[in-house]
Image: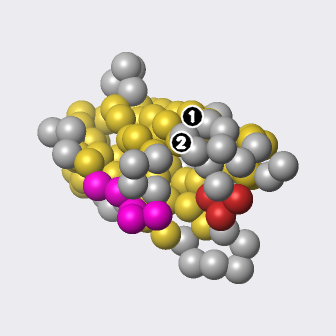
């Protein structure tokens, strides 16, 4: 069974930085796409950034040039470096993994439990 665990959330002042990390565990042969979504109170969950197995990245317009997604140094991990944070970045951030090949084949999208990011003075 695949599990995703996020870490690195917290409280930061506007203009500050945070780095989120996510690790996928289980018997995993490959992960095609890893990414981050976020959900602010009263709003729909939205895509923040994704990274393909070949390193191709995509970003939401609202975070482009401020956030950087990268594959972690360990296998099946992904990081999100968030700079120049704004109050509107406040949300629960969720890690996702898609096109995950396991012993039972491909079984859909996996989600982490979420980590809170609060940007406030």
Circle nearer the N terminus (2, 1): 1
Image height of 27 relative to 43, above or below: above
Classify mark 1: helix, strand or loop: strand
For the residue pair 82 and 96, the one nearer the viewer reads as 82
Taking the magenta stretch, the answer to whether it contains residue 60 is yes
Q: Residue 25: x, y in percent?
A: 45, 33
> Residue at (49%, 37%) from the top-left corner?
81
Image height of 100 relative to 70, above or below: below
Looking at the picture, the colour scheme in use is secondary structure
- Compared across the picture, whether 86 is left or right of 37 comes to right
How crowded pointer 1 is (Cα within 10 Å; few <14, some 14-19, many 20+) is rated as some
Residue under label 2, please give it: 82
Q: Is residue 60 visible?
A: yes
Q: Residue 48: x, y in percent?
A: 45, 58
Q: Which residues are magenta?
A: 58-62
How crowded pointer 2 is (Cα within 10 Å; few <14, some 14-19, many 20+) is rated as many
Residue under label 1, please give it: 19
Taking the magenta stretch, the answer to whether it contains residue 115 is no
- Compared across the picture, whether 63 is left or right of 8 comes to left
């Amino acid at each position: 069974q695949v599990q995703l665990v996020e870490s690195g959330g917290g409280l930061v002042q506007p203009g500050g930085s945070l780095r989120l990390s996510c690790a996928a565990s289980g018997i995993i042969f490959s992960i095609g796409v890893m990414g981050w979504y976020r959900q602010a109170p009263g709003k729909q969950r939205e895509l923040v950034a994704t990274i393909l197995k070949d390193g191709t990245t995509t970003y939401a317009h609202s975070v482009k040039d401020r956030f950087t997604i990268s594959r972690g140094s360990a296998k099946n991990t992904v990081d999100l470096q968030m700079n120049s944070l704004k109050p509107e970045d406040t949300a629960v951030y969720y890690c996702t993994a898609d096109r995950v090949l396991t012993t039972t084949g491909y079984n859909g999208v996996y989600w982490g439990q979420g980590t809170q990011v609060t940007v406030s003075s």
